[in-house]
Image: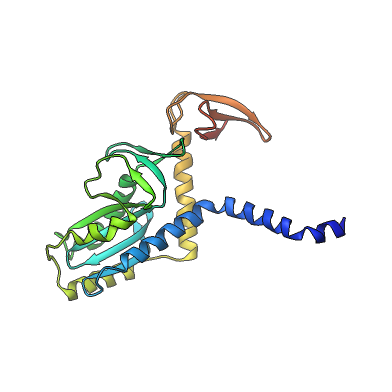
Amino acid sequence: MLDFFLSTWYLWVLVLLVAVLRLFQPVIKGWFGEKTVSVFLRSLPREEYAILPDLILPTERGTTQIDHVVVSLYGVFVIEVKNYKGWIFGSETASQWTQNIYGKKNRFMNPIHQNYAHVKAIETLLSQEYPTLPIFPIVAFSSDATLKFETNGKVVTFRRLARTIRSHQDNVLDSSEMMAIVERLRTADINSAVVKKEHVQRIKSRNREKADASVGDTCPQCGSTLVERKGKNGAFIGCSNFPKCRFTKKI
């Protein structure tokens, strides 16, 4: 048995790596998307734009995590990164959007709504000193995504991000004011391993509350009927649209 294990150790390592990658795939995917956006943002002239990645700012409800903030002579740009491929369907008012990749559909929260909370956090932080400062929310999807709706400049792909930012050319700040805002945001940033863990746990708790608050027998993710199912850990409530929709909740 030991000889067999030793002779096939590389297969066990491969299996372990695959399991780890599947477990942390959302985290890795998000990290890679944010790093890709950072590369595209480097084309912005440093004398006109300052880039602040991965900020966590305090709010009345706890904290909000912002993928990228670009402070410029022309205003502040708040960027929500979505490293999603395939066809993306949605609208500014819809509560959920849909990703269609190779015929498989996945629903996710409207990122424009998510970014609104980020904008409000920055507005609250800067409103006293800069009450008329323009703040532009932008959602950035993978360059491999196809946006199947009118975006109005609020939703772009990674490749169009810097161009979209540079399309705003009305000076509203001078260099000293721009750097003062950068320092204000850096001072307010409470990003740390502990705070980030608490932030993630808070989001998971909110998502569970939303799932538990679903009304009647309707799936909150896709609108299909909820049914009782049995799994290896006992009975649970699941979506009748499985496997296309994987919503579940405990009984």
Q: Position of residue 223 (x, y in %)?
A: 42, 27
Question: From where the camera sits, is residue 120 visible?
Answer: no
Give the residue drawn at x 36%, y 65%.
Answer: 38
- State the colouring used for the structure image: rainbow
Question: From where the camera sits, is residue 232 visible?
Answer: yes
Q: Position of residue 210 (x, y in %)?
A: 44, 37
Give the residue drawn at x 15%, y 68%.
Answer: 173
Q: Seen in the image, is 132 located left or right of residue 33? A: left
Whether residue 113 is situated above or below residue 166 in the rendered picture? above
- Quadrant location, the C terminus: top right
Along the line of sight, which residue is nearer the eye, 222 or 186? 222
Image quadrant in which you'd find residue 101: top left
Give the residue drawn at x 23%, y 74%.
Answer: 179
Along the line of sight, which residue is nearer the eye, 47 or 158? 158
Q: Position of residue 39 (x, y in %)?
A: 36, 66
Q: How many numbered badges does the structure rendering display? A: 0
Along the line of sight, which residue is nearer the eye, 52 or 162? 162
- Quadrant location, the N terminus: bottom right
Give the residue drawn at x 12%, y 62%.
Answer: 170
Q: Position of residue 36 (x, y in %)?
A: 40, 61
Whether residue 155 is situated above or below residue 103 in the rendered picture? below
Image quadrant in which you'd find residue 165: bottom left
Q: Seen in the image, is 6 located left or right of residue 63? A: right
Q: Seen in the image, is 90 located left or right of residue 176? A: right
Whether residue 12 is situated above or below residue 251 in the rendered picture? below
